[in-house]
Image (cartoon, helix red, strand yellow):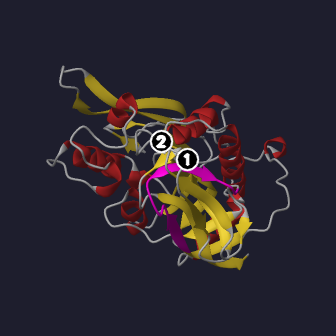
């Protein structure tokens, strides 16, 4: 394995993708942490922070490194805790040029800044991997229930999603020019983890992601210590094929009357939106039976804002 003209030996290697500089001329590196076992095997990639304000994903990868779960007994594990360093520094989703990094893959060697970042990841890292778990959170104040998003047409990816053990596996269309699309096209297997919200660290989301990741690592033979595997509670997994968003009927102060992950019935009262002066209060009701897989935590909303993400078609696994 050779990355940036550097041969990756056994044990730990840290390299820096020197892709761009700040306007002050200060280099801005993307840190890549690689652990390679002497025993041959597949290569796993953990990525987070493609959106710079999705810090819970960064915390998940940080803990995997801190607890040495990224040290394989066979094969190689590559960690990129912060892909979008610009966004992470500024605590923003996008790049300084206004582009969403997750909409410019596979990138260009001579294109705009975000495109150059995407190109560097795709050309230097992705050719070496077999599997990837990409950690994300909900945007802004939208809090996602821990879930795995996949392209269910690939049997191995679906099997890995089941092993991860999330309550919800969402069959999610792969967006053009996304990281997941570009990696999948090359034949790599990608699990996209969603949990929590932007600029927030949630202990339960983090723990659930680590537990699921360990399940996958053990299944693929990267690790084998039985003490690492937490006996997951017996949960019924749901395969989600269709969803819908419930949006705010008006602008105002928003209150939720239901909990994330719960099952709701058609016409059930989910919350309400009112003006701040004690006037009219408009109810927010469920348009169908389903599960709440995302919930807006913002106290003030505008008309049309997404408040609840509800499953509309679910199959048991």
The quarter of the picture where the C terminus appears is: bottom right
Residue at image point 31% right, 62% down:
177
Residue appearing at x 45%, y 29% in the figure: 14
**Which mark lies nearer to you, 2 or 1?**
1
State the quadrant of the N terminus: top left
Left or right placement of residue 19 versus residue 273 in this view: left
Q: What is the CA distance from the residue labelled 2 to the residue labelled 1? A: 35 Å
Q: Position of residue 148 (x, y in %)?
A: 60, 60
Up-down: is 20 above or below 72?
Answer: above
Q: Dot 1, crowdedness within 10 Å: few (<14), some or many (≥20)?
A: few
**Could you tell me residue 214's position as x and y percent?**
70, 48
On whether residue 250 falls in the magenta region, the answer is yes
SS label for mark 2: loop
Q: Which mark is residue 278?
A: 1
Q: Which mark is residue 305?
A: none
Write the residue at 55% across / 39% down. 56
- Magenta-drawn stretch, dominant element (helix, strand or loop): strand
Q: Position of residue 175 (x, y in %)?
A: 38, 66
Judging by the rendered image, the residue that carries numbered circle 2 is 54
- Residue occupying the point 38% across, 68% down: 185
Q: Which residues are magenta?
A: 243-258
Residue 171 in the image, given as x and y percentages of width and height: 55, 72
């Amino acid at each position: 394995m050779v990355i940036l003209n550097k041969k990756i030996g056994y044990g730990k290697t840290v390299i820096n993708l020197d892709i761009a500089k700040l306007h002050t001329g200060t280099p801005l590196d993307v840190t890549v942490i690689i652990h390679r076992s002497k025993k041959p095997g597949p290569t796993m990639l953990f990525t987070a922070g493609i959106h710079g304000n999705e810090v819970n994903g960064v915390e998940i990868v940080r803990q995997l490194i801190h607890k040495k779960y990224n040290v394989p007994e066979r094969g190689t594990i590559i960690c990129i805790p912060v892909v979008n360093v610009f966004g992470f520094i500024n605590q923003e989703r996008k790049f300084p040029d206004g582009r969403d990094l997750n909409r410019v893959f596979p990138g260009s060697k001579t294109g705009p800044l975000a495109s150059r970042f995407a190109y560097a990841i795709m050309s230097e890292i992705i050719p070496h991997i077999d599997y990837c778990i990409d950690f994300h959170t909900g945007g802004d104040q939208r809090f996602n229930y821990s879930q795995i998003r996949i392209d269910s047409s690939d049997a191995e990816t679906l099997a890995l999603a089941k092993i991860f053990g999330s309550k919800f596996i969402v069959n999610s269309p792969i967006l053009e020019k996304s990281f997941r699309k570009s990696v999948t096209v090359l034949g790599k297997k990608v699990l996209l983890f969603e949990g929590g919200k932007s600029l927030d660290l949630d202990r339960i989301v983090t723990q659930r992601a680590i537990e699921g990741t360990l399940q996958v690592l053990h299944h693929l033979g990267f690790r084998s210590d039985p003490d690492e595997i937490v006996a997951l509670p017996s949960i019924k997994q749901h395969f989600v094929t269709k969803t819908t968003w419930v949006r705010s009927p008006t602008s105002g102060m928003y209150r939720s009357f239901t909990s994330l992950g719960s099952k709701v019935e058609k016409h059930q009262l989910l919350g309400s939106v009112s003006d701040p002066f004690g006037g009219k209060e408009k109810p927010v009701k469920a348009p169908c039976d389903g599960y709440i897989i995302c919930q807006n935590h913002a106290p003030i909303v505008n008309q049309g804002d997404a408040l609840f993400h509800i499953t509309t078609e679910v199959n048991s696994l």
